[in-house]
Amino acid sequence: MYKKTTLDNGLRIITIPQKSTQAATVLVLVGTGSKYETRDINGISHFLEHMYFKGTKKRPSPVMVSETLDRIGGIYNAFTSEEYTGYYAKVAFSYLDSALEWVADIFLNSLLAEEEVAKEKNVITEEINMRYDHPMLYVQVLWNQLLYGDQPAGWDVAGTKESVASITRKKLTEYMKNQYVASNTVICVAGRMDEDAVIKRIKKYFSKIKTTKPLVRAQVFERQSNPNLLIHNRETDQAHLYLGNRAYNVFHPQKYAQRILSLIMGGMMSSRLFVRIREKMGAAYYIAAESSEDQDTGYLAARVGVDVSRVEDVVSAILEEFKKISTEKVPPAELKKAKDYVKGKTALLLESSDALAAFYANQEILEREILTPQQIFSHIDKVTPGDILKISSEIFKPQSLNLAVIGPFSNQERFQKLLKI
């Protein structure tokens, strides 16, 4: 069972003891990401995440930062999304105090040295280049751009080469002071631990965290009355695409039904799209559906890589499956399979302390409400075939279809005429 402790300064601590493990994970989430940026600092959340590994007062070089956990076999990293930024360390439980101290040190005492800022601009530029050269990854950048356009929700989390080049130490420091504050931060520890001792140490290590109020982000603007299409013309042997619709955000009461719908469509090897596109048509190696629910946006989409000569056939087949599930009730056995899949997969994932920390911390940072797995399963159990039919008809509307595709295509009309359900 988890325990949530909120300090007087607003810092939230979540502890989830596990007796049956030899590991422990420290995860710190900050409620800031690319949706909180402006055009001139696009990519700054991600840039700052990189800089937290470049040196602190106690560990003044990148090597000293990394060696601390390398010497004890720790697993550590960080990540940035549209909604939050995270830092974590996973260690053998006997080294938990070392992990807590290390995470607190990089979080509160990073130097953001000028010379490291200059070098990291080149590193991030190469990261942007790497993703651009990987169409399976880059098509998701295009998908967000297609859905949300020229606003923070539609920008690349990593920024552009131009915006990254313009970020200075002063801008990084100002952004950090504004966003990395107590009320905007969640610290989660999962695994084998002395819970009271962990809370006491967190209070000590994070005693200097700032207590100002974080910035409020701009509201996402969404409006669509016709199918949208974005083609990135590039010479490739395989076309990569996202095809789907806007859907519910994380606060919508039908988000559980949306997740089940995504599983039925393309979340399992026996799902409809996998069977249709890969097993029957033999047209793709990877084919999946994904449901995304953020604080103010959401979507449900299929993603696939397919030979360029078969892209129209695959798009048409996916749309046929969208239409079928939005006009015919899901058989009870198929719905039960999806529900049981969620329960079984969740049980397996939550065996590890890092997944357990993410499960609880993500809910707290996004929703400020935590449900246990059993409570979530209760919501999932209530989803009916009628619910799936209802939300499918609401989501898969022909006028709100979106298609982002990378491949050797210049003729928009060939795709535009396909976007019908």
Image: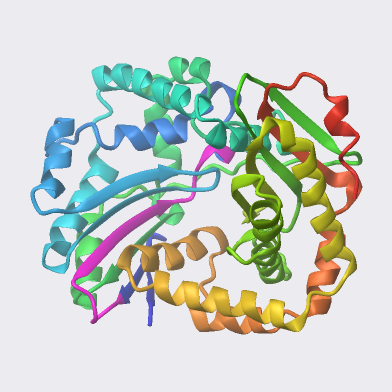
Vertical arrangement, residue 63 with respect to residue 304, above or below: above
**Residue 217 placement, left or right of 399:** left
Q: Is residue 358 magenta?
A: no
Relative image position of residue 369 (x, y in whole percent): 54, 70
Vertical arrangement, residue 25 with respect to residue 418, above or below: below
Kindly identify the residue that appears in the image at 63 percent across and 78 percent down.
Answer: 337
The answer to whether residue 102 is seen in the rendering is: yes
Vertical arrangement, residue 311 with respect to residue 18, above or below: above
Kindly identify the residue that appears in the image at 51 percent across and 65 percent down.
Answer: 363
Relative image position of residue 211 (x, y in whole percent): 39, 50
Vertical arrangement, residue 359 with respect to residue 158, above or below: below
The answer to whether residue 146 is seen in the rendering is: no
Relative image position of residue 141 (x, y in whole percent): 60, 34
**Residue 362 placement, left or right of 296:** left
Of the 4 image quadrants, the one containing the N terminus is bottom left
Residues rendered magenta in the picture: 17-35
Kindly identify the residue that appears in the image at 65 percent across and 64 percent down.
Answer: 271
Kindly identify the residue that appears in the image at 75 percent across and 83 percent down.
Answer: 332
